[in-house]
Image (spheres, rainbow, N blue to C red):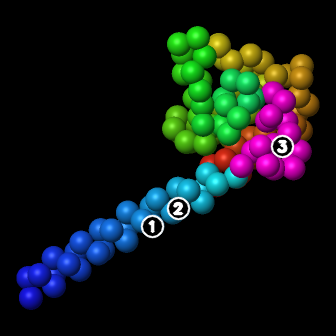
Amino acid sequence: MLKLKVSLVFLFIVFSILACVQTKSKRNSIVIAESKSYEASLYRQNCAICHGAEAYGKEIDGKFVPSLRFGDIENKSDQEIYEQIEHGKLPMPSFKNQLTEEEIRRMVQFIRHDLQGK
């Protein structure tokens, strides 16, 4: 009887872990390089050079540029992300002269929905 209980607990833990891993992979499953969306195109033109081709972040000159899929960005409001894109925050440059207000709004939604799955 004890072996059965231990087995059931073990199976529950395994299935719980698998559910979390599958949710995370679905959540971040967009492949930007293959996407034909306008937002993915904007990302490739303006963001990929620093945040990486697939938005997982990358190291530049010994400094890590953060992921747009997970991490600190998940704790920022849409308005904070919008302002970061519009005005920049060192070392990130401002994009207010390169992107329209509508394009910046679309990029915020791209980050939230396509990259983060929210």
The image shows residue 42 at horizontal and vertical percentages of 85, 36
Give the residues drawn in magenta, as a range: 31-46
Left or right: 21, with 83 as reference point: left
Q: Which amino acid does label 1 sit on?
A: Ala
Q: Name the residue under label 3.
A: 39
The image shows residue 28 at horizontal and vertical percentages of 61, 51
Disc 2 vs disc 3: Cβ atoms closer than 8 Å? no
Q: Mark 2 points at which residue?
A: 23
Disc 1 vs disc 3: Cβ atoms closer than 8 Å? no
Q: Which amino acid does label 2 sit on?
A: Thr
Question: Which quarter shows the N terminus?
Answer: bottom left
Mostly what secondary structure, the magenta segment? helix
Q: Which mark sits nearer the N-terminus, 2 or 3? A: 2
Q: Which residue is drawn at 77% across and 43% down?
A: 33
The mark found on residue 62 in the picture is none
Q: Residue at x 65, y 13 (%)?
A: 91
Disc 2 vs disc 1: Cβ atoms closer than 8 Å? yes
Q: Mark 1 points at which residue?
A: 19
Secondary element type, mark 2: helix
